[in-house]
Image (cartoon, grey):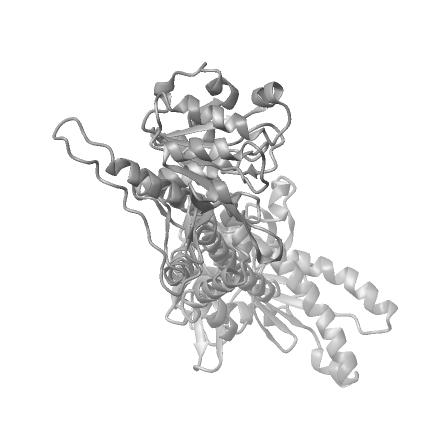
Amino acid sequence: MTVKTWVKYLKSPIREKHLFLPGLLTALLSMGLWQIGAWQSLELIGFNLVFKTRNYLSYSSWDSRIVVIGIDDHTLAEYGEFPLSRDRYTQLLETLEASPPSTIGFDILFTEPTNADAKLAEAMEINGQVVLAIAPGLHQQTLRPVPILDRVTSKGHIVSNADLDGVSRQLSLYINEVPAFSIALLAAYNNSLQQTFTTDNNSRKTPILLPQPEPGKNLLSVWINWVTSTRNIPTYSFVDVVNKKVAPSQFKNKIVLIGFTATGANDPLKTPFEQTPPTSGIYLHAAAIDNLLNNRFLQKIPWQVELFLLFTVGIISSLILIFLQFKQRIILLILIPLAWFILVVLVLNNSHIWLPIASPIGTFLLSGLTVQWQEQKEKQQLMSLFARHVSQETADLIWQHRDEIFQNGQLDAQEMVATVLFSDIRSFTTISEGMKPKDLLDWLNSYLGAMAECVQKHHGVIDKYIGDAVMAVFGIPFPHTRAEEIEQDAINAVYSAIFMQEKLVTLNQELKLLGKPAINIGIGIHTGLVVAGSIGGYKRLNYSVLGDAVNIAARLEQLNKNVNNGNPYGILISETTFQLVKQHFHTQKVEQLQLRGRQQLTLIYSITGIKKETDTKNRRGKAFGR
């Protein structure tokens, strides 16, 4: 079994040669997804979830200076269908004169002239701080109020653009230097403040600092900070205000917005809090005014910083996940996104900064998938490699503890007690001379495959094939130090040998049908001290075992040629192995011999059968423990 492949896989290339590769691939993939807008839809969902969560963590409220007068279902039931008669708006302005607001904004287009326009213009001029809406129309024209109303009021555009999910998150404060409705209202509010004196030192109130259009820039957009549900903005029915069912003090020195709020409005507005059903468009301007009054528009991090964040998350998360076990990764893949979500909520709540949520979390999850995919791919390759030499159970254990046995690019040498099994085909030379090379290889491979299956089934490792000989070891690659483990290795080896002989009976029947020679083998087994590790040069390495135990097993296998009586299975074992397996197998003492290459005598036994009282579970043996 070569370890050139072991060098490539056992030490986990993720950790050595490809330490940064999963992270780099993840980072580049995430940045590419960002570039094509793939994260956008998830980011919008995250946006809504963050705002709803923030609402549970801390109490937030809209600015108390903002009041909405809505043309609601109750108003339409009294006055009829929209649009209302212009004299209704005149009545409203006259009603508000009793406790005048600081400024009044009509989120209504007065583009068609009527007979009531003169009185309405007079009422607007008396108030002095009225703002009307303008909007883009067809053929690049602007829908403006009728001239008589245009002359006595300020104007602001009511353009709004929803995102892909229909939620309004941005507002253009200026379009070609035309101010938004909210900017125009606050400009009028500042004018009102200049005419208002405080009671303590008779000084004017400080005006609100408003953003100015940037030269050469057609659009100046901001991100709306949806403080809470728009249902929490004080809203009164138009008809109730006109009929004086609402105390005038509710509007004194307030910023009053008047708009359509009835069911089925043609100006629906979706927010993170209201989507089904949506709320009314007037509340977009209310939210913008609140953000301007309190300087709490959302601040989004620059795109360069976001890309750098994705790159950093991709690299660092992969470096962390590489060194964790699967269960630890799962825990981290749950905790880190949750921690990032909490961080995003806290930052939003404390500093009004909107950190991206979906793309960093998605990048982290992609890192987990990339690392897991890479490791799974390597594990499959490793399992495929070891499946030819060890059982699946053993291969899994080697994978789990690969760092314990693999050092400095090779399997570190370890001294351990193991049981070595040697088998060899009788008269192989004679048989091979009478067969064509291709037929010989097919015949030999069918035999070696059957023998390997028996070894692996009993948790042995095929060390090597030496022509027609098989060398298998039980008790590697992890050292066994407990007596019961060493005993079980010996038992597994003997069971494996018996199964090999039984397997040959079936195999020979198949070979006979194919007209091929039958196979007879001898097996030698010895338990003793071995050294296991990588053997060879830099370009060619083998994992194998060395030691006197290997030589004894090979000599015992050769003795089978001379031991026919009392050796039904063709299996010879040493005294050491005999002491370990005698409770499980019937044996017969063969003789005490001096094996070639050894000075001391070796007591040899043959295996004659399995003891019936032995637990039947032992026929399959036990895997080595850790």
Q: Is residue 349 visible?
A: no
Q: Nearer the viewer, residue 292 or 165?
A: 292
- Does 376 sit left or right of 598 as displayed? right
Q: x, y percentage for residue 410?
A: 42, 71
Q: Is residue 99 above or below residue 333?
A: above
Residue 431 falls in image quadrant: bottom right
Q: Is residue 128 visible?
A: yes
Residue at horizontal 54 percent and vertical 47 percent from the top: 162
Q: x, y percentage for residue 288?
A: 40, 41
Residue at horizontal 40 percent and vertical 69 percent from the top: 16
Residue 213 falls in image quadrant: bottom left
Question: How many numbered dots are placed on residues in this image?
Answer: 0
Q: Is residue 561 above or below residue 54?
A: below
Residue 114 falls in image quadrant: top right
- Does 423 sit left or right of 288 as displayed? right
Residue at horizontal 60 percent and vertical 45 percent from the top: 618
